[in-house]
Image: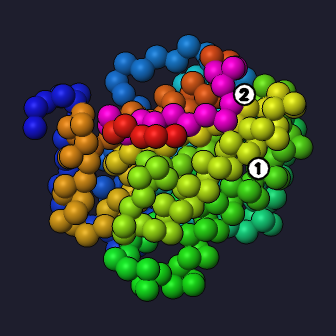
Amino acid sequence: MSDTGDSSKPKTVPAQHQSVQPGLEHEMNPRPEYIRDGYKGSGRLEGMVAVVTGGDSGIGRAVAVHFAREGADVAIAYLNEDRDAEETRGLVEAEGRRCLLFRGDLGYEETCRDLIARVVETFGPRIHVLVNNAAEQHPKGSLDEITAEQLERTFRTNIFAQFFLTKAALPHLQKDSSIICTTSVTAYRGNPQLVDYSSTKGAIVTFVRSMAAQLAEKGIRVNGVAPGPIWTPLIPSTFPAEKVEKFGGSEPLGRVGQPSDVAPCYVFLASADAAYMSGQILHPNGGEPVES
């Protein structure tokens, strides 16, 4: 394949596997790039308060750091990856912004209410940006292998949490606030090994469009981002080592994506630059065409 990608970034990654989900960023080789060298903030989110789920690592970490560099204070929700979360807090604080860590399972409505209560207690009553990003996946070769427990677990984390958290946050969102939901390229092309995961990501696309229509009269924008193959802890923790080694190499741009490739989409959608966009999905996926 010709070298059409960014030559400064690795085209593929070494074979590796982590035995526990949702995976740990500090155990990855190489470590994901959360912000590219030379990225300069321009105050586009100055004075804002943002909530980022799954913010301990991967895309969530990249979003949190980018938001901080653009001037926002950030609340990070995560499941149980304490070391990664502390690292992300240090990165946000190094940008001169405040960072709240919240540990809990967002698949349950009470946890989502508790998160928003902590955010309001810490930063005040206004939330400017809600990023629904946390997700999990469990590859299975056949529908028969997807248990009722796995199906419920995947839907709770990936789509129920977005309903619960958006509902809890709405009283604190005002005109010009924004909600950004992470869907996936699998919502558009499917994936034979990720049937339940892909189904939740398709549901998120519809959630974005429906909520955008519902909240338009309040001036609250709802958009989404559909990443392609991005190097995050979810990859080595869910796929075998031999598949990880090939991850992302077949994309048109010729390399695996980094969280730093994706996070600027969230900055744009959260900022006034996207004031006339709602109900839309951005596609940082390495050049794969999709039909929306």
The dominant secondary structure in magenta is loop
Q: Nearer the viewer, mark 2 or mark 1?
A: 1
Which sits earlier in the primary sequence, circle 2 or circle 1? 2
Q: Residue at x 44, y 80 (%)?
A: 143
**Disc 1: which residue:** 166
143 horizontally vs 169: left or right: left
Q: Is residue 278 magenta?
A: yes
Q: How is the image coloured?
A: rainbow
Q: Position of residue 116 (x, y in %)?
A: 79, 51
Examine the image and state in which quarter residue 258 appears. top left
93 horizontally vs 30: left or right: right
Residue 46 or residue 181, whichever sits in front: 181
- The amino acid sitting under disc 1 is Thr
Q: Is residue 125 magenta?
A: no
**Which mark identifies residue 48?**
2
Q: Position of residue 180 (x, y in %)?
A: 64, 39
Residues in magenta, as a range = 274-287
Quadrant location of the N terminus in the rendered image: top left
Badge 1: residue crowd in 10 Å (few <14, some 14–19, many ≥20): many
Residue 144 or residue 238, whichever sits in front: 144
Q: Residue furthest top?
A: 42
Q: Position of residue 11 (x, y in %)?
A: 19, 41
281 horizontally vs 159: left or right: left
Examine the image and state in which quarter residue 73 appears. top right
Q: Position of residue 128 (x, y in %)?
A: 75, 32
**Which mark identifies residue 38?**
none
Q: Residue at x 68, y 60 (%)?
A: 161
